[in-house]
Every structure is written in structure tokens, then in C-alpha cells.
């Protein structure tokens, strides 16, 4: 049988995605059932335990396929990037809904009614998808009423079909955001999460982890022959940075524990001592 990456293919010895039948060995195959994430952020674990490693996060409104629910955990695969893992069953929406808009602010509050002076009842990250039922105005501020209840600032949302023009400009919004291993949101983010979310807001679907991105995004370039430019990606083993111009880069990193700007030359010198020199340069 074929060896498939378990991060992108749902298969275990006892259960597997029906689409993998004939490709992997499993006692049972299932087509799974569609669902959506109903919490602002859902931590995705490598095993059905809260102390298992957090590999990534899914955002509110993300479509997933559920292969199994047991003992408070759901084994799921995200539709947008194919990532497989375990989320708390509490993260799944109680009822089905069809998102209409996506959050464009780094973070945005949900109010119980269209009144910004009311205490917020939730907060969503950039990239979260919500279902809007109506637009109303209160004292000159426009709000979008959510089908699930509550209201959000209209200027913080855009229709799902709309996208930002420049993914680097989106990434720059996250400057100073705390670094979080496995994070994909405005509450905390890691290096490849920053690349993925920024590109997603610009209408580009890319894979989640650094090694996947290094093998799949855009085309390889040789910096000895082609000068790096804004938007190019620089990869190290286990790390990625976004070029802001020909010398300055932006990356979520464990050195500052934030999303930070840093000269490429300084980063190469600093990182080389621990992890070696860059392995790939790619132009999306």
C-alpha cells in the first residue's frame, strides 16, 4: 500500500477516509459527514487528548469532514487545506450554517446587539467566516447582524468572494502578534500560519506546514541569479519568512516570540548557528 502523509490523508489502522480505499490498509472506511467549526478558534491536536501536540488551528466557519466522534473528540479533515487532526467536539457548530462574509480585521468583536458600548460576547480572528443576515446602522456605525445572533462591525467584514490584493500587506497587519506554535489566527500565529492566512485572505489556498509550503508554493528562485523581492518566501528547515523588499523580511518567530521585521542578512547569520542556512527561496 502507498505511504501517505497522515497530516493530509485521514487514515489509521482501524479507520480511514473512504476516498483512500485501495490506497491504505484499514479495518473500516467511512465517507465522513460535513460540519463547520463553531468556536472562534479550534485547536487541532495530533491525538485525541488535550495534552497532545497542537499541530494547527481551524477558524470559525471552516468546513470540515468528520470521520469519527468519540469521548469528546472529533477526528476531522479541513476542506480548505486538507489538514487532518483531532478537535474537541465542542468546537463543532451545533447547527449547519452557510458563511457569507469573512473577517478582515486582525481581530473583531461580536456584540450582543448593534451597540459598540455593550460588552462583547465573543471575538473572531481575521479569516473567520460568519453568516450575515442583515445590515443595520446605529449612531452612524454600520453593523452586520449574524444569523447565529450578535452583531459585528460592518467595516471588519467582507463578502467571501472578495479578496485582498496583496498578501504581504495582509501579513504586515500581524506585526507584533504573539508567536504561537501551531497558531493560525490573530490571537497567536506561527511562521507558516502567517503565510497561509495572509495568502488565504488574498484568495490563494496553500498548504499548512513549512515543509509542505517549501515544496509547493510558486516557483523556486536562485538568489544568486534572481534578486529577492517583495512577496518572495525564504525557507529554512522548519521556518519560513516573507520578504517585504529586497532586504527586509517579516516572520513569526521564536526568537522574539512575535511577528517581527528583521533584515534577511541578520536572520541568515543568526539562524545558521542553530539550524543552518536557507534551504529554499520561492516566488508565489
Image (cartoon, rainbow, N blue to C red):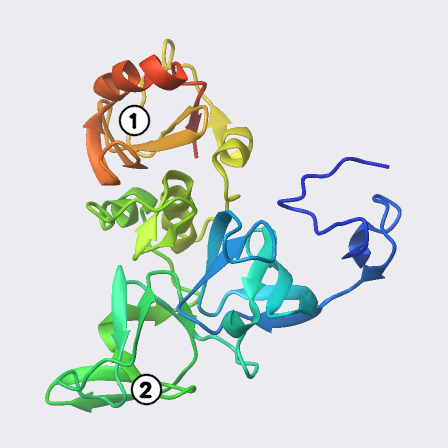
Coordinates of residue 108 in the picture (x, y in percent)? 26, 69
User: On the rendered structure, is 34 left or right of 43?
Assistant: right
How much space separates mark 1 and mark 2, taking CA atoms?
Answer: 43 Å
Would you name the residue on which mark 2 appears? 150
Residue 284 vs residue 117, the one in the foreground:
117
Quarter of the figure with residue 229: top left
Left or right: 185 in relation to 77? left
Q: Residues within 10 Å of mark 2 (few under 14, many from 20)?
A: many
Residue at 81% x, 54% y is 14
Q: Pick whichever of labels 1 and 2 is earlier in the sequence.
A: 2
Look at the image and tell me in which quarter the N terminus lies: top right
- Left or right: 68, with 182 as reference point: right
Identify the residue at horizontal 67%, vertical 43% (top origin).
6
SS at circle 2: loop
Q: Position of residue 82 (x, y in %)?
A: 61, 51
Q: Is residue 205 visible?
A: no
| Observer-nearest of 258 and 14 | 14
On residue 229, which mark appears?
1
Q: Secondary structure at mark 1?
A: loop
Seen in the picture, residue 74 relative to 119 is either above or below; the reply is above
Instruction: Work out whether 130 lies above or below 192.
Output: below
Whether residue 138 is situated above or below residue 181 in the rendered picture: below
Q: Give coordinates of residue 144: x percent, y percent.
A: 30, 83
On the image, the x and y values in percent for residue 192 come to: 42, 40
In front: mark 1 or mark 2?
2
User: Quick check: 87 above or below 270?
Assistant: below
Residue 80 in view, yes or no: yes
Report the residue at 51% width, 47% height from top.
Answer: 53
Amino acid at each position: 500500500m502507498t505511504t501517505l502523509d497522515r497530516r493530509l490523508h485521514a487514515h489509521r489502522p482501524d479507520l480511514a477516509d473512504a476516498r483512500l480505499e485501495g490506497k491504505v490498509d484499514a479495518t473500516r472506511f467511512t465517507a465522513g459527514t460535513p460540519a463547520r467549526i463553531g468556536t472562534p478558534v479550534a485547536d487541532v491536536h495530533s491525538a485525541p487528548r488535550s495534552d497532545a501536540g497542537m499541530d494547527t488551528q481551524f477558524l470559525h466557519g471552516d468546513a470540515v469532514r468528520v470521520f469519527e466522534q468519540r469521548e469528546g473528540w472529533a477526528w476531522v479533515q479541513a476542506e480548505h487545506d486538507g489538514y487532518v487532526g483531532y478537535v474537541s467536539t465542542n468546537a463543532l457548530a451545533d447547527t449547519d450554517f452557510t458563511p457569507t462574509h469573512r473577517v478582515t480585521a486582525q481581530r473583531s468583536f461580536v456584540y450582543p446587539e448593534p451597540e459598540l458600548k455593550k460588552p462583547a460576547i465573543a471575538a473572531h480572528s481575521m479569516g473567520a467566516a460568519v453568516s450575515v443576515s442583515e445590515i443595520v446602522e446605529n449612531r452612524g456605525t454600520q453593523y452586520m447582524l449574524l444569523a447565529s445572533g450578535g452583531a459585528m462591525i460592518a467595516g471588519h467584514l467582507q463578502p467571501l468572494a472578495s479578496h485582498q490584493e496583496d498578501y504581504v500587506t495582509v501579513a504586515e497587519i500581524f506585526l507584533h502578534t504573539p508567536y504561537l506554535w501551531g497558531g493560525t489566527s490573530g490571537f497567536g500565529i506561527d511562521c507558516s500560519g502567517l503565510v497561509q492566512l495572509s495568502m488565504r485572505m488574498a484568495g490563494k489556498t496553500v498548504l499548512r506546514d513549512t515543509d509542505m509550503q517549501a515544496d509547493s508554493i510558486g516557483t523556486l528562485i536562485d538568489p544568486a541569479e534572481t534578486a529577492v523581492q517583495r512577496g518572495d518566501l525564504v525557507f529554512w528547515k522548519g521556518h519560513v519568512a516573507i520578504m517585504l523588499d529586497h532586504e527586509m523580511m517579516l516572520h513569526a518567530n521564536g526568537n522574539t516570540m512575535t511577528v517581527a521585521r528583521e533584515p534577511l542578512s541578520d536572520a541568515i547569520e543568526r539562524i545558521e548557528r542553530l539550524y543552518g542556512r536557507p534551504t529554499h527561496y520561492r516566488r508565489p
